[in-house]
Amino acid sequence: MEYYYITDPGKVRLRNEDSVCICENMQGEKLLIVADGMGGHKDGEIASSIALNLICDRFTNISSVGNKEDAINWIQSTVSEANAQIFKYEKEHSESEGMGTTIVLAVLTNSFLLIGNIGDSSGYIFKNKKLHKITIDHTLVNLLVKSGELTPEEAKNHPKKNVLMKALGSSPNVEMDIFSVELNIDGIFLCSDGLTNMLDDVQIAKVLSENTSIKDRLEKLVFKANNRGGTDNISVAYLEINKEESHD
């Protein structure tokens, strides 16, 4: 099992408001997080770092997340705590009004894998050289697709494609969607929309399938996203579980 993560400001934004991390607790269970901050100036950067630092700190200081039900409860309560901290910071700093962050995370133990999200940062599993998206984006256009008002094709280039319906720090109570995922996979891949707005799932999977180091593959994804315009900050985290199958 190997992992790597990387973040890049992209070619257009002056600041990098993303935060990304992979950490483990005392039992060796893994936590992956990507948070894409918003709010302009330093505010998005603050929101994403508050969320990431609090959740990683709580995770590294517990021996285990317990069984699957315990883990779901731990995720929900810890994410709620992070949300409360961001909300509190915003109320205490008037210049930070409107700050918030998306978040996608994965918790991997020997018994189960949970992937959760708020916003439009994406969580995938990688299996047999293909990416399978697990998370569902909390965006206006996704809502319109579900209601039949937009087709998936129309949604791809819709002018309001990045309008979020849900974000951490946007209201006092925000609940994370959590998905239980099979363990028979080759890898876990998380990213901000700075990557998925530039590359589609097939292009990402092609790079992840290459027989090079994880570091080289993730750096290549960032390079490709920047080469296509790099209109946003780009963050990726990848944990490879089964290298042999990924490169057969």
Image (cartoon, rainbow, N blue to C red):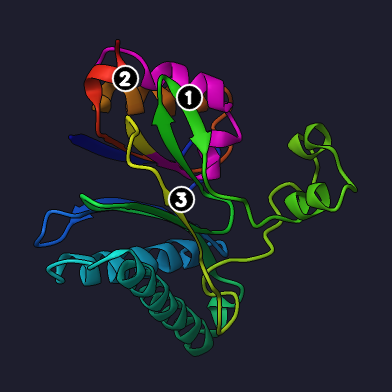
Residue 182 % position (x, y): 39, 43
**Helix or strand or loop: what does disc 2 sit on?**
helix
Name the kind of residue labelled 3 in the image: Arg
Question: Which label's residue is closer to the chain start, 3 or 2?
Answer: 3
Q: Name the residue under label 2.
A: 246
**Residue 51, x across and y down, in percent:** 38, 68
Badge 3 marks a residue whose secondary structure is: loop
Residue denoted by label 3: 15
Quarter of the image with the N terminus in it: top left
- Point out the tag, 2 or 1, that comes first from the N-terminus: 1
**Between tags 1 and 3, which lies in front?**
1
Residue at image x 35%, y 33%? Answer: 185
Per the rendered image, the range of residues in magenta is: 189-212
Mark 3 or mark 2, whichever is nearer to me? 2
Q: Is residue 58 left or right of residue 45?
A: left
Whole-Å distance between the Cαs marked 3 and 2?
A: 34 Å
